[in-house]
Image (cartoon, rainbow, N blue to C red):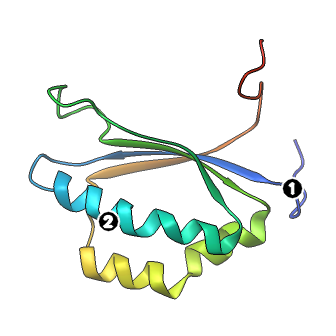
Amino acid sequence: MTRDHTDPVTLAFVGHTTPALSDRAAAYEDEVLPLLARHGARIVYRGRRKHGQEATLPFEVHVLWFPNRAAFDAYLADEERAGLLRRFGEVFTSKQVVELDTISAAGSRP
């Protein structure tokens, strides 16, 4: 599918971390995710692994929506976001970001 730079962008983020870094990872996400709003983006879903589950499972999973590619690029280049990255350091041992195509919207039936 060809994408236009004005098309909305929906991303899934899956982040893994260690038990030693989990509090720091949660604190980082608590501070960085509110920056989405200044770029017209929103958190569709944010979830965290249930307490007591295997530490090898993903720690946090997000679905994020951006109004267009420029908004996503602006979020990535946000100076405050860069400062948080420097302040917290790398809090995830691995992370995946997947750009999604919508198959069905929330509340609709397949």
The local crowd at label 1, few if under 14, some if 14 to 19, many if 20 or more residues have their Cα within 10 Å, is few
The outermost residue toward the left is 20
- Comes first in the chain, label 1 or label 2: 1
Image spot of residue 45 (x, y percent): 54, 41
Q: Is residue 100 left or right of residue 46?
A: right
Q: Is residue 72 above or below residue 100?
A: below
Q: Nearer the viewer, residue 16 or 33?
A: 33
From the viewer's perspective, is 71 left or right of 77? right
**Circle 2 is placed at which residue position?**
28
**In this figure, which residue is indicated by the disc labeled 1?**
7
| Residue 76 appears left or right of 104 | left
Q: Residue 101 at x, y = what percent?
A: 75, 37
Label 2 environment density (alpha carbons within 10 Å; few <14, some 14–19, many ≥20): some
Type of amino acid at the residue the image marks with label 2: Tyr
Instruction: Name the residue nearer the viewer: 6 or 105.
Output: 105
The residue lying at 26 percent from left, 29 percent from top is: 50
Residue reaching furthest top? 110
